[in-house]
Image: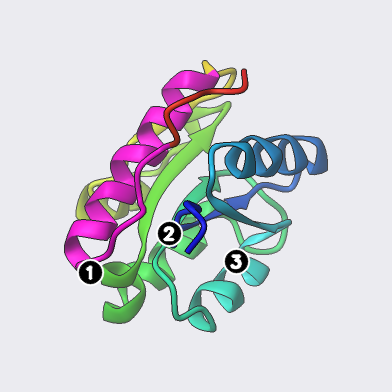
């Protein structure tokens, strides 16, 4: 391994600018970045991925919303234990009681848009470290320098 993290980060957002920017930032931090434009693509990627993934999930998206993804995750032991999740939303008031229950079950941080990049990176690093410890892996920590 060349110092890159074996933990992957999946950016799930319907806004291509956000996805591309966050993927570039994650790669600059040493993570392997994946992206999905909606929840359907995200679930397919998560189900087919053998690596632990930190999922940065937008709440409001067409097709399958973040809430729909979380409902699928809490009902699938493999998805709920293999990966770590965080919610990214500009509208926290749109979190339904059911979604709030999923968030609590998965012990997810909620990051409100607009957000400080360092706060998001710190949340990703904490999630990656939890995943690494859970799965007995190395290489989950954020690189020692930040490009932004």
Q: Is residue 106 visible?
A: no
Q: Real-space Cα distance between discs 1 and 2?
A: 10 Å
Residue 30 in percent (x, y) is at: 54, 45
Instruction: Report the magenta residues as a range.
Output: 117-142
Q: Residue at x 50, y 62 (%)?
A: 68
Q: Is residue 19 left or right of residue 17?
A: left
| Residue at x 34%, y 49% (from the top left corner) | 128
| Badge 2 or badge 3: first in the primary sequence | 2
| Residue 88 visible in the snapshot | yes
Quote the CA–CA distance across marks 3 and 1. 21 Å
Q: How many marks?
A: 3
For the residue carrying disc 1, how many other residues have a C-alpha within 10 Å: few (<14), some (14-19), or many (20+)? Answer: few
Identity of the residue drawn at 36% across and 64% down: 83
Asked if residue 134 is among those painted magenta in the image, a careful observer would answer: yes
**CA gap, disc 2 to disc 3?**
16 Å
Q: Nearer the viewer, mark 2 or mark 3?
A: 2
Q: Is residue 34 magenta?
A: no
User: Contact, CB < 8 Å: mark 1 with mark 2?
Assistant: no
Marker disc for residue 7: 2
Task: Give the numbered dot on residue 42.
Answer: 3
Is 91 placed above or below 28 here? above
The percent position of residue 102, horizontal first and vertical second, equals 30, 55
Residue drawn at x 26%, y 79% as measured from the top left: 77
Q: What colouring does the structure picture have?
A: rainbow
User: Mark 1 = which residue?
Assistant: 135
């Amino acid at each position: 391994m060349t110092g890159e993290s074996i933990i992957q980060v999946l950016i799930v957002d319907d806004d291509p600018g956000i996805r591309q920017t966050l993927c570039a930032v994650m790669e600059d931090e040493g993570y392997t970045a994946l992206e999905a434009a909606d929840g359907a693509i995200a679930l397919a990627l998560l189900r087919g991925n053998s690596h632990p993934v930190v999922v940065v999930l937008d709440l409001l998206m067409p097709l399958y919303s973040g809430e729909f993804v979380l409902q699928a995750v809490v009902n699938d032991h493999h998805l709920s234990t293999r990966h770590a999740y965080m919610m990214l939303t500009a509208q926290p008031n749109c979190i339904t009681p059911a979604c709030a229950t999923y968030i609590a079950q998965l012990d997810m941080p909620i990051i409100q848009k607009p957000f400080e990049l360092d706060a998001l990176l710190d949340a990703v690093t904490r999630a990656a470290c939890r995943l690494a410890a859970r799965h007995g892996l190395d290489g989950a920590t954020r690189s020692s320098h930040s490009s932004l």
